[in-house]
Amino acid sequence: MRLMSVCGLTNQLKLVMIKMNNILVSVKNLTTAFKMGGRYTTVIDDVSFDIYKNEALGIVGESGSGKSVTAKSIMRLNPVTVSKVLNGKIVYDGTQDVLELSEKEMCSYRGNKISMIFQEPMSSLNPIMTCGNQIGEAIMLHQKISKKEAREKSIDILQKTGMPSPEKRIDSYPHELSGGMRQRVMIAIALSCGPHLLIADEPTTALDPTIQAQILDLIRGIQTKANMSVLYITHDLGVVAEMCQRIIIMYCGCIMEIADTYDLFTDPLHPYSQGLLNAIPKMNEDKEWLHNIKGTVPHFTEIPQGCVFCTRCPEACDSCRDTRPKLTKIGERREVACHRVIHRLRRDQ
């Protein structure tokens, strides 16, 4: 885990200010359901957040929190045979609701406007196509250029990702490459048409720490040069501490807290955010056992009617179990969904 200490959350993260009126993607009241046992069950429940231009935003939570489903909803990649959006909007650049686009229009939207890096490059890449053909296919889909020009551009993009000997690797098949090389191919495909937003879904899964660092540094460098927004989907707080200006904490398909990175690490408000941060081992503490959040993430068919975290929360009260708290704005750049926190902050004002 590449976790920075609170002191390591430097002035660069503390002082970064995203223009609040500079929104690239706005997710509004998104509710997504999947078919389970013959009926649709809500897995993303009334989720709202914004992604600003040139911003690095992280979505963090345990497995089963709905992070990847949220990301795939933005790309409209959830399988239509077993899922559907029950409510909400996903507005791109203030003008176009992505959910209203036809599938033909989505083909232009994906890749050109927003691209995605998936968790497992080995299963995401086509095993019977060379890496060059897969990158070139993405380029030719959106740009009117010849196959030769697409190949030259593919080599150039691979070189920018730090791929060793790109003119040779372009003719390799995915199984002939290491995990880090395959991830670079995925990044090359995602960046081939210059998207405005890159969604990175667990981009360093199954990679050793050295390669993880290289991939994250690569994404950060490309983001800076291309003035691109990045949405990181991860369970690793170390990644968002180092890479993101803002963080969304998700649990059971709901947003628990949204905050600037520095604020979240120095003063987490929601009990779930506190639990996640307390579970991180600290170099200056000598403990035999790490802190853990009691219990497990409930199945989506067993979500409590009140706060979704109430069955595991050490501070839960009757109102938590009876009524679901709404994500409430606390100050200009922070939101939290917790009855006790909202009551306390209002009382102290």
Image (spheres, rainbow, N blue to C red):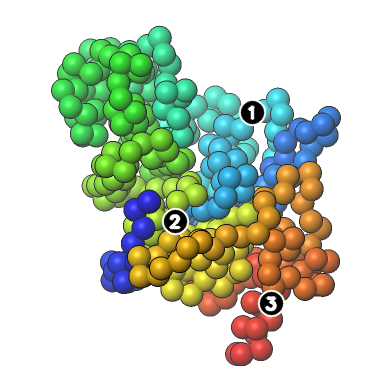
Name the residue carrying label 2: 237
Given the image, on which type of amino acid does mark 2 rest?
Answer: Leu
Q: Residues within 10 Å of mark 3 (few under 14, many from 20)?
A: some
Name the residue carrying label 3: 340
Name the residue carrying label 1: 79
Choose top left, top right, bottom left or bottom right for residue 114.
top left
Q: Is residue 179 visible?
A: yes
Choose top left, top right, bottom left or bottom right for residue 156.
top left
Label 3 sits on a secondary structure element that is helix
Q: Is 43 on the left-hand or right-hand side of 118?
A: right
Q: Residue at x 51, y 66 (%)?
A: 278
Image coordinates of residue 143 in percent, x first then y, are 34, 23
Image coordinates of residue 341 in percent, x first then y, are 64, 77
Q: Residue at x 79, y 44 (%)?
A: 301
Image coordinates of residue 12 in percent, x first then y, are 28, 66
Q: Residues within 10 Å of mark 2 (few under 14, many from 20)?
A: many
Given the image, on which type of amino acid does mark 3 rest?
Answer: Arg
In the image, 19 versus 208, the foreground residue is 208
Q: CA distance from mark 1 to mark 2?
A: 29 Å
In the image, 191 versus 181, the foreground residue is 181
In the image, 239 versus 232, the foreground residue is 239
> Sequence-wise, which precedes: disc 3 or disc 2?
2
Label 2 sits on a secondary structure element that is helix
Q: CA distance from mark 3 to mark 2?
A: 24 Å
In the image, residue 209 sits, relative to residue 275, either above or below, namely: above
Q: Residue at x 72, y 40 (%)?
A: 33
Choose top left, top right, bottom left or bottom right for residue 291.
bottom right
Given the image, on which type of amino acid does mark 1 rest?
Answer: Pro
> Sequence-wise, which precedes: disc 1 or disc 3?
1
Q: CA distance from mark 1 to mark 3?
A: 38 Å
Q: Is 189 on the left-hand or right-hand side of 86?
A: left
